[in-house]
Image (cartoon, helix red, strand yellow):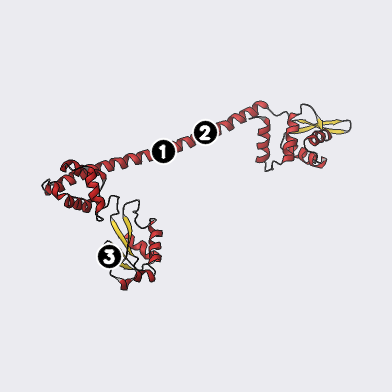
Amino acid sequence: MEPYLYWRKKLKDEGFRITATRDTILRIILDSHSESAVEEIHKKALDLDPEIGIATVYRNINLLQKIGLIKKAGINNNKLRYVLSEFNIESLEKESDVFKSIEYLKELNGIRDRMSKQLEEVEKIKIQKEIKLEEMLKNTLDVDAIIKRYGNDRGNLIQILIEAQEKYNWLPKHVLYQISELLNIPLTKIYNIASFYKFFDLEPRGKHSIVVCTGTACHVRGSMNLLQRIVNVLGVGPGDTTDDLKFTLDTVNCMGACALGPVMMVDKQYFSNPSTAKLKKIFETFN
């Protein structure tokens, strides 16, 4: 560490601010290679900042003497002179090496922590992929069984899709691909059929379905407020599914339960205008 940076750090460690004036005086003293009187230091300071007063120089000289940068060198021509302290350069270099070592260790520990977190993330991804692969292999066996029950008859495609939808709560791409291969039906045709019927879902849906009535009767009784409370609790909007695939939130124009309005339904259970606290308890009961 060069002397200038060292003494700036020393000032900060002692609790002193590095003002522009203090920085100027520090540089002048460090650049001086001989004894100097306060008046001489002040004259050099004026060349850099005409507004620096001699009293300010005196105060900073006393401060720099206090932290050990300079010392009194005696009196010459009735003026007290100062000189840089004979601080041990080797000691300063050793202190600098220690500082660098500490910084290096901090950086090394930071790298290690980041690598550890990255390895944890990689391990999570690996586990998730393994779980997904196991699920896909299990799905393959399930789809085989469904198709066999319909005698591998391509004429039963819609019934097979319905049963697959009931099994997985949506129609995953790999399931549609397998149905296409086993029944020898173009994948595009299967997608066209699945897209045509609103019953089929080509996006993941939650294990449990939450439906909020937004019809006129419920609307005037505050169904939008109820919907907003649900959004706040789950963190998803209408038409979306929670990240854990536990809930999917939807709205309908009428449930036929106007007397309960505003009303929501979780799976087949009706709930009339539950508060935020009540919503949290309701959702916790569904595994």
Q: Which residue is mark 2?
A: 105
Whether residue 229 is situated above or below residue 38 in the rendered picture: below
| Category of crowding for the residue at label 3, using alpha-carbon neighbours closer than 10 angstroms: few (below 14), some (14–19), many (at least 20) | few
Q: Quadrant of the C terminus?
A: bottom left
Depth-wise, is mark 2 or mark 1 nearer the camera? 1
Kindly identify which numbered label has been placed on residue 118: 1
Depth-wise, is mark 3 or mark 1 nearer the camera? 3
Depth-wise, is mark 3 or mark 2 nearer the camera? 3
Where residue 186 sits, quadrant-wise, is top left
Q: Which residue is mark 3?
A: 269
Q: Secondary structure at mark 1?
A: helix
Where residue 8 sits, quadrant-wise, is top right
In this rendering, does residue 148 appear at all? yes
Mark 2 vs 1, N-terminal side: 2
Where residue 98 sits, quadrant-wise, is top right
> Label 3 amino acid?
Gln
Kindly identify which numbered label has been placed on residue 230: none
> Label 1 amino acid?
Gln
In this rendering, does residue 175 appear at all? no
Instruction: Name the foreground residue: 110 vs 264.
Output: 264
The residues tagged by marks 3 and 2 sit, at their Cα atoms, a distance apart of 59 Å
Q: Secondary structure at mark 2?
A: helix
Place of residue 227 in the rendered image (x, y in percent of width and height, measured from the top left): 38, 63
The residue depicted at 22 percent of the width and 43 percent of the height is 187
Place of residue 90 in the rendered image (x, y in percent of width and height, measured from the top left): 65, 26
> Label 2 amino acid?
Leu
Place of residue 167 in the rendered image (x, y in percent of width and height, measured from the top left): 21, 52
